[in-house]
Amino acid sequence: MLQGSNVLGHERPLVIRISFTTCVLATVCLPLLGLISCVYISSVFHFEDATGTHCQVPNYLPSISASISLSPECHIWRFCIGLHSAPRFLVAFTYFKFYKAHFASKSPERSLNCLNLAFSISENLGLLLLTYVSSSETYFVHKEGFVLFIISSLVYMLITCRLWKAIKKYSLSPEDAKSHHWKVRILILNMSFCIFAGFFYWKHNMYCESGSYTLFALFEYLVVFSNMAFHLTAVWDFKSRDVMVISSSEDKDF
């Protein structure tokens, strides 16, 4: 929603107001649609290149790293993540202020809040690193970015569930209870998918069994989808909030 007008020769500031729900949905949909597009294009048009393995065993699904390293898939993915990253930092700092307002200055949750912000930022940085350095360009850097993303996201989700457990304890809001309920369940799913993905990746590298890399790719998708679902719970946390951008009528700066 836009607001702004000229009253008695004085220009009012321009106000752009977007509901936080819309912001969260757009932020989650960008990587979701980008990933689905990349996997689809890789599977249909670049199947041999996207599913090839170092030991030449049959594979029927492209891994995410393979999907986003080809062209035009890499450009689609980089465009989506580029747009996605700025709102992610905004959401991270919004949560930081939200938790800070809920907990006393000397409570252990205050320290956890700082850690939560740090891991949220490092998760986003890991995602940017694995996005803009593809596995076909510099594999080691891409791999380190992926590891940073996975570890940071898991720790972030664990701390978030701990913070929401404390919030739910003193809150009468059904939205807070529902948010904590789904956060915990999505965390459990995400950890389970990570374990299965790691197991099949290890099995493929150790024994080069047919189908192991396909199952790794499948669980890798589920890890990412469950991560997106976890971040989507922010819709309940900030249901009545808005994101506002205000321009100054004096110097035209935002």
Image (tube, rainbow, N blue to C red):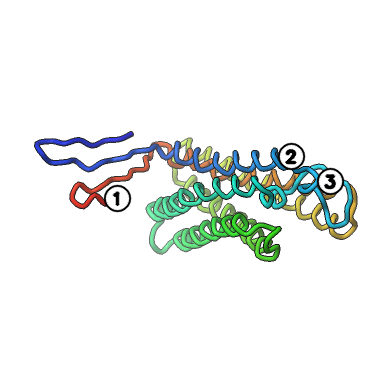
Disc 1/disc 3 C-alpha distance (Å): 51 Å
Q: Nearer the viewer, mark 2 or mark 1?
A: 2
Q: Amino acid at mark 1?
A: Phe
In primary-sequence order, the first of circles 3 and 2 is: 2
Q: Residue at x 63, y 47 (%)?
A: 187
Q: Quadrant of residue 198?
A: bottom right
Q: Amino acid at mark 2?
A: Phe
Name the residue nearer the viewer: 114 or 102. 114
Q: Which mark is residue 45?
A: 2
Q: Which residue is mark 1?
A: 254
Name the residue nearer the viewer: 127 or 44. 44
| Residue 205: % across, % down | 84, 59
Name the outermost residue toward the bottom: 140
In primary-sequence order, the first of circles 2 and 1 is: 2
Q: Left or right? Give the position of 183 relative to 217.
A: left
Disc 3/disc 2 C-alpha distance (Å): 16 Å
In primary-sequence order, the first of circles 1 and 3 is: 3
Q: Left or right? Give the position of 97 relative to 115.
A: left
Residue 72 seen from this side: yes
Disc 2/disc 1 C-alpha distance (Å): 44 Å
| Residue 245: % across, % down | 32, 45
| Residue 74: % across, % down | 63, 49
CB-based contact (under 8 Å), mark 3 and mark 2: no
Q: Which mark is residue 59?
A: 3
